[in-house]
Amino acid sequence: MKQPSLKKNFILSMMYQILKIIMPLLTAPYISRVLGAKNIGIYSYTNSYSMYFTLFAALGTVTYGTREIARVRNDKERRSQLFWEIEILTVLTTSAALVFWGIFTFFNKSDAIYYAVLSFNLLAVMFDISWFYAGIEHFEFTIVWNSIFRVLSVIAMFLFVKKPSDLFIYIFIVAFQNFAGNVGMWTGLSKFICKIDFKTIKLKHHFHETLVYFIPTIATSVYNVLDKTLIQLITHNKAENGYYEQANKILDMMKTLTFVALNMVMQSRISYLFEQKKYDEIKRRIHTSVNYVLFMGIGILFGMMGIARTFVPWFFGPGYDRTIVLLEIMSPVVVIIGLSNCLGAQYYTPSGKRKQSANYIIAGSVINFVLNCLFIPHLMSAGAAIATVIAESAITILYVGHCNRYLTWGVILSHLWRKLIAGALMLAVILFINQYMNVGFIALIVQVGVGFSVYCLMLVILKDDFVIDFAKNQLLAKLRH
């Protein structure tokens, strides 16, 4: 197979991640006003329950499948055999999860109508073959189909969600979108696999290996999903869940900008480089990735803290003031998770040390669970936000400390200090502007524009290596043409 273009894949991935950001930017202001914080909260905690079952349905096949396909991507027969073994295993585990989901729905009659339509989340797992395309570094099929149905889902929301009682329709649109996008991916599969003898299918080894990947996945859900469940169980306040859901929605968009597109592309390439034993190149790529993550993450951290009080009322409408506090508390998570996610995707998983990383994630999950139980009764959703920041910090410390020096604190600090100075100055400028402008779109544009300009200008003055290297590369590219 021809060596895929890393630059092309990164551009495609970034375009898709930008689309994933644009879609909520279009729908969230409308949906938040139509459904209200209470109904957003109902969606948040019912969806959190469905996520537990989807985790069991998928086991660890997405991460494991990407890594294994990447290792054999140049051998069509081996990758075809591997694809069907992992996919058949996924069909079996999803079928079992659907049975237990049906039982769960039967015994939760008050929200059964929402749980029923959320079954599409589990069906989506059965048809998800994004891990195969990621392994062979052909992202176009994943991106095109998911983009089509994301756009269609936005149109459907504006057409059919008109009042608070349309919560069922909203949940259906969101769940069906994921399912339909995954089904569409199968249309390009025949180009990359060949016929195999299904009598040779072996599942036992894959089941054992996916369980290794499943452990950190389920542990991660403690602070990605369990927070929402615990807020509802402890506070019995659907609106608190709604505030927390909206804050996480913004943070997810910011995380997408910071590292999701990058790691989506780099994980497959570095798995291949580990197979080729090109360790110096791996270390160089990790350092470059971390520098990019810090550049984006620090800018977003201080920028979000500065504009939160302008952005939330304008974006979500009245009644979401609590979300401002949550964003201010949780904004450091973008940088913290950016570092751990970078090492997870570019070192621990490609090098086969997923089991080691699982121990660190479990430790963080235990910290998160304990702190949630301590903080939520007194601070409600803010308690969950504080617990998340502390737990994610613990995981990142463990990740950096045990990554075999592929990344060190010295390297991080050498890239970080200039960005912190620039970010702090940007925050000061934004807060100064806040004193003289009312909440609104114009104020937001001024704050973002001036803040970003100050951030970049300070990095140039401080001779930050990321900005200087970026400027040099752009200039050289123009000179070549």
Image (cartoon, rainbow, N blue to C red):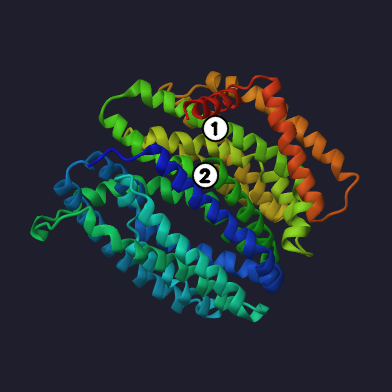
Of helix, strand and loop, which one carries label 2? helix
Q: Say if residue 14 shows up in the picture.
A: yes
Q: Amino acid at mark 1?
A: Tyr
Residue 52 is situated, as x and y percent measured from the top left of the image, at 45, 60
Question: Looking at the image, do the residues carrying marks 2 and 1 touch, with CB atoms under 8 Å apart?
Answer: no
Q: Give left or right: position of 206 versus 6.
A: left
Considering only vertical position in the picture, is 432 above or below 15? above
Discs 2/1, front:
1
Mark number displayed over residue 292: 1
Residue 132 is situated, as x and y percent measured from the top left of the image, at 30, 51
**Residue found 56% across the figure and 49% down from its top:** 369
Q: Quadrant of residue 316?
A: bottom right
Q: Say if residue 309 shows up in the picture.
A: no
Residue matched to label 2: 366
Front-lying residue, 328 or 184? 184
Residue 239 is situated, as x and y percent measured from the top left of the image, at 70, 66
Q: Amino acid at mark 2?
A: Val
Mark number displayed over residue 481: none
For disc 1, the neighbor class at 10 Å (few under 14, some 14 to 19, many from 20) is: some
Residue 58 is situated, as x and y percent measured from the top left of the image, at 35, 57
Q: Give left or right: position of 428 versus 49.
A: right
Of helix, strand and loop, which one carries label 1? helix
Q: Quadrant of residue 404?
A: top left
For disc 2, the neighbor class at 10 Å (few under 14, some 14 to 19, many from 20) is: some
First along the sequence among labels 2 and 1: 1
